Amino acid sequence: MRGVIGAPPPPLPELAGDYGRVAVFGGAYNNWAAVTAVVADARRRGAEAVWFLGDVGGFGPLPDRTCEVLRELDLPVVQGNYDDSVGNDAHDCACGYTDPRDNHYAQISYDYTLAHTHRDHKRWLAAMPTEARIRVGGKTLHLCHGSPRRVNEFLWESTTPAGFVGHLCDQWEAHAILCTHTGIHWERRLTDGRGVINVGAVGRPANDGRREVWYALLDASTGRLDTTFVPVAYDWEAVVAAMRAEGLPEAFVETLATGWWTTCLEALPARERHHGRH
Amino acid sequence: MTAAPPSPQLPLLWLDTLWVQVTGTVCNIACKHCFISCGPKVTTHQIMPLGDVVQALDDGIAAGMRSVWYTGGEPFLHPQILSLVDAALARAPLGILTNAMLIDDDMAAELGERFRTAPYNLELRVSLDGCTEAANDHVRGRGVFAQTTAAIRRLAREGLEPVLAVSILDGTDAGDRQALVDLVRDLGVRRPRIKWIPAFRIGREERRRGGRAYQSWEQLTAEEVTAPDAPHRLQCGTSRMVTSQGVFPCPILINEPDRRMGDRLADALRPCAVDHKACYTCWVEAFSCAV
């Protein structure tokens, strides 16, 4: 694995695209309505491609519906830990939670998603590439799910320092690392413009008290690599109705209805937790 | 006579955590179970000057570290503790292991300000080994429960909600999870978190009445050490500990001279032996001092 002290770095993937403006989103979490709205918004804004950084399932209802939407859109993808687990019929989501309450709710999500994902979709999930490289405005970006070194590593804003950002960019020979997994969008740029961009997740709100979900639009028309985090409204009530019909926990429903996380909170660093309601 | 087989070596994957023993083994209390035998007059490892700590932090940056943890002894005994906190938070997220007894209203306010405004996360982990005065002070010393709980209340008032670190010791009763949660909630902590600390049967814990030494079978096997997940499961796969006496694989083994890896962090960015009996505790408990 690249990034391991003293180990020779393995080759990096071939370039998979060269763009001037590209949209990137993560964490669909079975929210087909949000995925549909985000892709439509990105295309309306002139994105030449829309990349998805993984985790099709989890949290929401009717997993096959989101698989169908994503496959119909034929988006380029990077595999998340959830996709690897569901695709390979693993026992848990491998989200990386360490708290019993987080794991309790994560297991409810996972068992539901695993049981309701069609075999054909599982094959698609299992076959996803684990990383990708693209170029935007001549700058090379490395795309991954958690971090380039571990699929379920949490890169939070308050725990990803500048020195570490530079280290990752050096190790992966990239102008920027694009990731998701935490569910909250942020970016940290160094003075030379390199950085880490966490594109957030579209399957549930960003624990900010808003019902919209967020994706990242990257644009190189100014000669720099500019990031815009875009909020998108979607038909959350349709998703909530399906969650209730499927018997998913009311705590999950509350998150979509209020914009505040109610579960999987213990993984948050103290700083990010402080900004939430629960 | 055949030579002993080489000690199993664990690779260092990367540096998630840089530990810095800012106050050495100097502590304001002398807990009966302290596995590095700290106390008011214990200078096995001395207090580190500010410049040495900053050097360690910069060495950590050069090695790609993600986070810093300060420990001791008791870090708040350091005469320049706020400068140390600022030096770390200018570079990386910081955690501090403390008994909190020295955190008065002014210090709590200073820490709260940094928690709200520093570029990176600040986390405090406060040791308390019982949800009653009798249970806690039995191992941590008379009057400690009152001072520590008062400090937790001050920190909570500042929005800094410390993690409670609770030791699991033979022959003592820290209280169950719910009792501890109720205690810290009563102290004003809205979101109680508990970190359970297993007994490391070295230092004072080895000699504590009710404690015990490691048994001969408590040893990692070569098969376990070479398992693919071993560097993720053992904290020495992703961390190093800087002290006034040099660099060690972890915060547990600093009193073991043969575990010293060098003078500076760069000397210790290499595999380490994991054949100490305390390594067995980290393995079976899946324990990390940091997470």
Image (tube, rainbow, N blue to C red):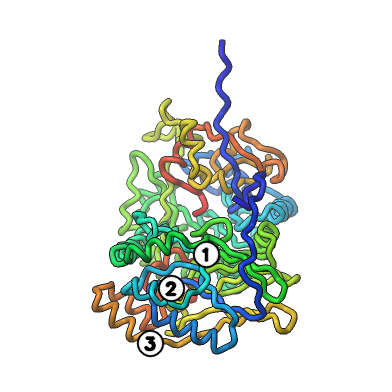
Could you tell me the amino acid type at mark 2?
Answer: Arg
Cα distance, mark 2 to mark 3? 20 Å
Cα distance, mark 1 to mark 3? 26 Å
The residue that label 2 is drawn on is: A71
Residue A230 in the image: x percent, y percent? 54, 84
Q: Which numbered mark, 1 or 2, is in the foreground of this view? A: 2
Q: Residues within 10 Å of mark 1 (few under 14, many from 20)?
A: many
Could you tell me the amino acid type at mark 1?
Answer: His
Q: Is residue A112 left or right of residue B148?
A: left
> Residue placed at 55% from the left, 31% from the top?
B8
**SS for tag 2?**
helix
Q: Chain of mark 2?
A: A
Query: Residue A145's mark?
Result: 1
Q: Residues within 10 Å of mark 3 (few under 14, many from 20)?
A: some
**Labels 1 and 3: the sequence-earlier one:** 1
**SS for tag 3?**
loop
Q: Is residue B155 above or below residue B32?
A: below
The residue that label 3 is drawn on is: A235
Using the rendered image of the protein, determine whether residue B41 is visible from the camera's viewpoint.
no
Residue B197 in the image: x percent, y percent? 43, 47
**SS for tag 1?**
loop
- Are the residues flagged by discs 1 and 3 from a single subunit? yes
Q: Chain of mark 3?
A: A
Q: Is residue B257 above or below residue B252?
A: above
